[in-house]
């Protein structure tokens, strides 16, 4: 799934928390890359989004590993 398709789908979701969970699920299922998650968080102003740290710098390997740990921890909380 590319950025245009994700943005189109997210327009149909009214609740911001539901949109965040949808993006998380698509990432966990391998349908969207991590960079798209970061881009969507920036575009939508999800500064409190636990999946990513919204920054302008590319993620380092430590940040990447930390983001994955947060993703899997959050997945347990949502289920």
Image: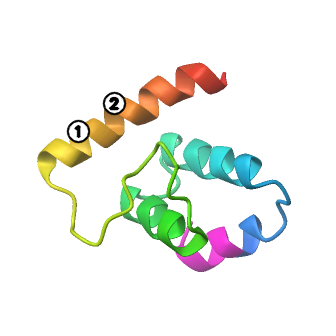
Mark 2 in CB contact with mark 1 (< 8 angstroms): yes
The answer to whether residue 69 is above or below residue 19 is: above
The answer to whether residue 14 is above or below residue 76 is: below
**Furthest-front residue in this view:** 48
Please name the residue shown 82% across and 54% down the image.
15
Please name the residue shown 51% across and 63% down the image.
41
Q: Answer whether residue 9 is magenta in the image.
A: no
Q: Position of residue 79 (x, y in %)?
A: 66, 21
Q: Which residues are magenta?
A: 1-7
Q: Nearer the viewer, residue 29 or 21?
A: 21
**Helix or strand or loop: what does disc 2 sit on?**
helix
The label number, if any, that marks residue 69 in the structure image? 2
Q: Position of residue 72 (x, y in %)?
A: 44, 28
The label number, if any, that marks residue 7 in the structure image? none
Q: Nearer the viewer, residue 43 or 30?
A: 43
Please state if 16 lies on the left or on the right of 20 as rendered: right
The image quadrant that residue 12 belongs to is: bottom right
Q: Position of residue 31 (x, y in %)?
A: 53, 53
Colour mapping = rainbow
**Helix or strand or loop: what does disc 1 sit on?**
helix
The label number, if any, that marks residue 65 in the structure image? 1
Report how far apart the C-alphas of labels 2 and 1 lie in the structure: 6 Å
Magenta highlight: main SS: helix
Q: Residues within 10 Å of mark 2 (few under 14, many from 20)?
A: few
């Amino acid at each position: 799934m590319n950025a245009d398709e994700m943005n189109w789908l997210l327009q149909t979701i009214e609740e911001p928390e539901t949109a965040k969970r949808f993006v998380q699920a698509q990432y966990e299922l391998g349908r969207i890359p991590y960079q798209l998650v970061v881009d969507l968080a920036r575009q939508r102003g999800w500064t409190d989004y636990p999946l990513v740290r919204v920054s302008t710098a590319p993620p380092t390997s430590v940040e990447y590993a930390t983001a994955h740990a947060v993703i899997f921890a959050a997945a347990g909380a949502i289920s």
